[in-house]
Amino acid sequence: MLRITFPCRSAETVQKAAPLQTHPHTTLITADAPVATFTHGGRAKCLQRLVRLDLPVPTTVALSFSAVHEIANGHLPDIASIVACFAEDALMCVRPSSEDPDWGGPGAILNVGMNDARLAELSATMGAEAATALYLRFVQAYALHVARLDPDIFEDIQSDCPGALGTALELYESEAEEPFPQSMAEQLAGVLRSMARAWEGTTARLLRQAKGAPPDAGLGLVVQQMIPGLGKGECGSGVLQLVDPMTGLPQITGRYLSQSQGRDALGAGVEALYLEEDPRGPSLAELAPEAFARLKFIAALMRAKLREEMQVEFVVQGGDVHILDGVRVPRSARATVRIAVGLAQDGIIPAQEAVMRVEPNMLNELLHRQIAPDAVRDVLGTGIAASPGAATGRLVFSSAQAQASAARGEACVLVRRETSPEDIRGMHAAAAVLTERGGMTSHAAVIGRGLGLPCVVGASGMRFRTGKQQIIAEDGRVLNAGDLVTVDGSSGQVLAGEPAMLEATLDDAFQTLMTWADAARDIGIRANADTPADAQTARNFNAQGIGLCRTEHMFFEPGRLTVMREMIFAETSRGRAAVLERLLPMQRDDFVQLFRIMEGQPVCIRLFDPPLHEFLPTSRSGQRELAEALNLPVSHVTRRVEQMREYNPMLGLRGVRLGVTVPEIYDMQARAIFEATLEASHESDPVVPEIMIPLVSAKREVELVKARVDAVAAEVRTERGRDFNYRLGVMVETPRAALRAHEIAQHVSFLSFGTNDLTQMTYGLSRDDAGRFMSAYVQQGVFAEDPFRTLDIDGVGELLRLGVERGRQARPDVILSICGEHGGNPESIAFCREAGFDYVSCSPFRVPVARLTAAQLAIGHKMGAD
């Protein structure tokens, strides 16, 4: 039968330790000791839980955050009382215990208490070679981390050479100007002081703050008796876990270093995975089957009682098992989801807790291909991580080249200084996009996220020579068209070559988690979708409709672009209407497809928004081609292009201003929507389209457009002899529209706040140019965050609150939403939920992130209320 033994503590030792158990900041870990995560850290609390499970945990003393802070300030606890808790011949290790293990901490120091006398004792029991190795390792660790000696002094010491220990001790005495300490108390005091001061240093503080720790986060320390894992019978050490850390699937994995197979104490030994057979050598299951069985039982017990998949750190000595620690299994995003779902399905945690355990942005790693964590990264340059995922392809410098590559079946990376609507087809054909300019809400970023296309923008550290079809990397390497690169839209890096990838994974665990999330959330989630492919992606991710369909992208198809240009050159209203008649069936087919895919769910269609000059060629060759296509003199085309050029197109003739001054466009679109509504309603439940007027700033604009849309609706009803319903709304993108929401709301059914343009206009800041200086602004504290990435709660948020308040006062049943890129940002969703919005709309691939975020907010609110 397997013997599970605890380290021996004599009655005398326990009696000496008794006063320590009641000390408020230095505590012997027992089942009822006053230990908590927020006072002593997660490691100390976990060890206490293991003690409560009656597991074989070596004697351990916990020092609280307060005690460690005092040590850093030069006030040591009663070291003698700590030492008295342990057997006189024990060696100890000291480990960090922070409140959150992700915050890190100083490295563990092992073999505290090793000295000349202990060397002689251990040499008699474990052999001189093993004992000397332990002592040498401790001398080097103490010299580097406690005495702060230069690590180079030991670089010539070979651990397996005779006299290495003596040389190390001499070097220590020479550099430290004192002999190596022989007292366990002195050694322990030095180790505690060193680790405490390391935690409170400036560098450590900045590192943990970057991981989300508060500036005043505390550190606890645990002092634990070491089990040598040496002696007669099977001896060794290792870790064991019950799941694969990459997939989360049940699989016993880990490592075991056996010392009883003729190996030394430095850690060299037979490494065995926990399988029944291992070609590299005997596994623990073969060497000590009873110990292996006991470890599996302990791991399962920890999973059930600690409500988490745990990695068990253990030592086997003479066949006996000792549990040194239990830590949360390190895991990938895929494993995180599967582990949380598995714990809930096994009844260990509630389903809502499983939802709360998955950080929403982790889902990006499941939705997109990612570079493997262990892949070598040959970084060429960095930019803004605008659209997550990674893809490899050959460099191309135009949309035409991208389409040609796609036709050949070759993956490509589209390189542009900045993209425009004319690049849509090239973006569809490319595997990834890289731009020199732009920010989080630039054209490339927005379209990339909508397509699920990896995208890095604002890579200004690299030089783009588009005329020569070259990029100069940050280190000077020259990249030419056709060179193979990888774009990592999750990190913002551009890499040379083709690193190993992890494929996207949407398995049954993901679907189960999202079902639980949908049951909990209390705010709607729609998708921004411009094409049937976008709409299908939105449906696949269970979006509750389309919150923004940007119709202008439909006009850049080659067969439509020429017609659109012909309309621009028409001289009269009747001439424009006649040309647009040719676009009508194309637009109608677009909308029919969207309505069919969404199967009765709401579809919000934004009427034409961009300035017309975006549809005209800017190059001389393009203008000559257009003149030939329209049978016009080149001079006429050039003059018209010049006439339509604007100094500030973002604030020029676009959006509703086009609807008022060139109403034929909106008339055609409204007819296409209504005819598509009737056609799609033949096949399913009646469709109720939502028509959105962009860039409104005055109620009179709404009145004018509404009158024409209503007139078109009446015409279609009369012509078709059938009735239908629709909803008309406004896209609130200007500060004035938000401030006058009470006037506008009286004429519409919904207000959808376009936070991209609203942020631009509130700040007076171009989203396409902000990437050039945004990092400097954030670093210097001008902005807390990039306002195009995270919604500005104080400024833009105040406009949103005013718009919500005033809109609802004028019309209590008005539907309120946001449809900018902020709709997929977790912090922004929290604001929208609290402010009373009915739904948010975001890029299709961000829908799962938004669904999970909304669920966690609702669950958290309910927990707070309870």
Image (cartoon, rainbow, N blue to C red):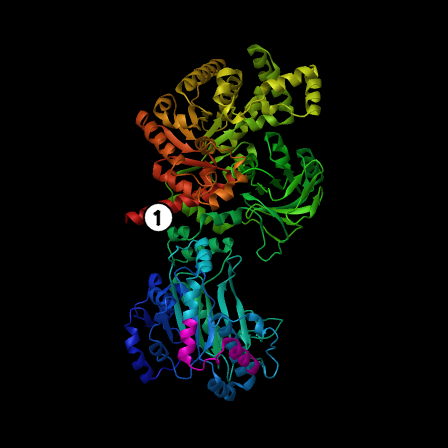
Please report the residue visible at 48 percent of the width from the left and 80 percent of the height from the top: 180
Looking at the image, is 349 positioned above or below residue 781?
below
Q: Quadrant of the N terminus?
A: bottom left
Please report the residue visible at 28 percent of the width from the left and 47 percent of the height from the top: 865
Count of marks placed on residues: 1
Residue 225 in sight here: no
Q: Nearer the viewer, residue 513 or 99?
A: 99
Looking at the image, is 9 positioned above or below residue 786?
below
Residue 817 lies in quadrant: top left
Q: Nearer the viewer, residue 681 or 399?
A: 399
Characterize the magenta stretch by its predominant secondary structure.
helix
Q: Position of residue 34 (x, y in %)?
A: 30, 68
Residue type marked 1: Gly
**Residue labelled with disc 1:** 860
- Stretch of the chain drawn in magenta: 166-192
Q: Position of residue 821 (x, y in %)?
A: 48, 37
Is 95 placed left or right of 801 in the picture?
right
Identify the residue at the far bottom of this view: 124
Is 318 placed left or right of 618 in the picture?
left
Q: Does residue 478 show up magenta in the picture?
A: no
Q: Nearer the viewer, residue 393 or 173?
A: 173
SS for callout 1: helix
Q: Does residue 174 show up magenta in the picture?
A: yes
Query: Within 10 angstroms of label 1, few (less than 14), some, or many (20 or more) residues?
Result: some
Q: Position of residue 688 (x, y in %)?
A: 44, 26
Residue 843 in sight here: yes
Q: Position of residue 310 (x, y in %)?
A: 44, 64
Looking at the image, is 104 positioned above or below residue 433?
below
Residue 553 lies in quadrant: top right
